[in-house]
Image (cartoon, rainbow, N blue to C red):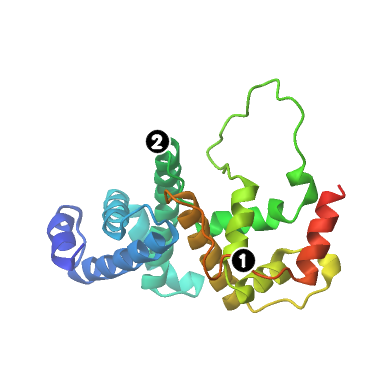
Amino acid sequence: MTHDQIHEIGNAIQITDDQAEMLAEAANEVGRKFARQYPALEADDITHEVVAQAMAEWGHISTKMFKAADYGRSMFEVLHFLLSERASVYCGRQHYAYMMANATAIYTPREVRALLREYYFNPDAWTTPVKDTNHGVAVEANSIWVNLADLGQAMERITAKAHDTILAAYGPEDLELPEPDKRRVSEAVAQLTRELNRHLNKTNTNHEGPGARRAMSNEDALYITRKQGN
């Protein structure tokens, strides 16, 4: 959304020219940022949504901006933060609505991090459950479903460097692997997310070409042996 569009709409709620320019810049940045995190959503849609919300709440938002110095921040930083809060809620709702309405699943890096941290390296998560008398469980607003076998196949298809980074970051503590750099972890998780989405959302998931198989490391062998023994 452009500065002129915001300024034209904002005249009715007394947004100054400088504020309109700041809102346009911050909203476009937030739109691009969250579009990278939520592949099913368009940056322009996110931008328009946060601008609409900001204008509807401009009295509250402008008050927060004028108090920026109290937070040790600039007015732009406060505005960017407030727009990001609204984008996070909007994108979360849209993302789960999309997943529930479509057979196609699109996972985000944040979700994949949660799966790695809470489930993938937990042997109990791989245990076959007993008979489910409730015929499944309710899907809550903040819940995610994934077949861990799909995640495991995606793990087999990422590069050895990314795999080892994820293992060091999220794997069993008794492996005593050195903690990897946060940037490398983010890149590895992003690669795994892309591979998981690609694996789930293409017709032919069989791939026997170069890169499809990789020699198993000692750490992997230890992990799988431990998992199978539980």
Q: Determine the residue positioned at 50% across, 54% down.
A: 199
For marks 2 and 1, the one nearer the N-term is 2
Front in this rendered view, residue 228 or 179: 228
Determine the CA span between mark 2 and mark 1: 34 Å
Q: Which residue lies furthest to the top in this view?
A: 133
- Residue for point 52% across, 66% down: 209
Graded by Cα atoms within 10 Å as few (under 14), some (14 to 19) or many (20 or more), the crowding at tag 1 reads few
Q: Which amino acid does label 1 sit on?
A: Arg
- How many numbered callouts? 2
Of the pair 42 and 133, the residue shown nearer to us: 133
Residue at the image position 62 percent from the left and 61 percent from the top: 155
Pointer 2 residue: 101
Q: Is mark 2 on a helix, strand or loop?
A: helix
Circle nearer the viewer, 2 or 1: 1
Q: Residues within 10 Å of mark 2 (few under 14, many from 20)?
A: few
Q: Position of residue 134 (x, y in %)?
A: 67, 21
Q: What numbered label is drawn on residue 118?
A: none
Which residue, given by chain and number where applicable, does mark 1 sit on? 213
From the viewer's perspective, is 153 left or right of 37?
Answer: right
Indicate whether 110 appears above or below 190: above
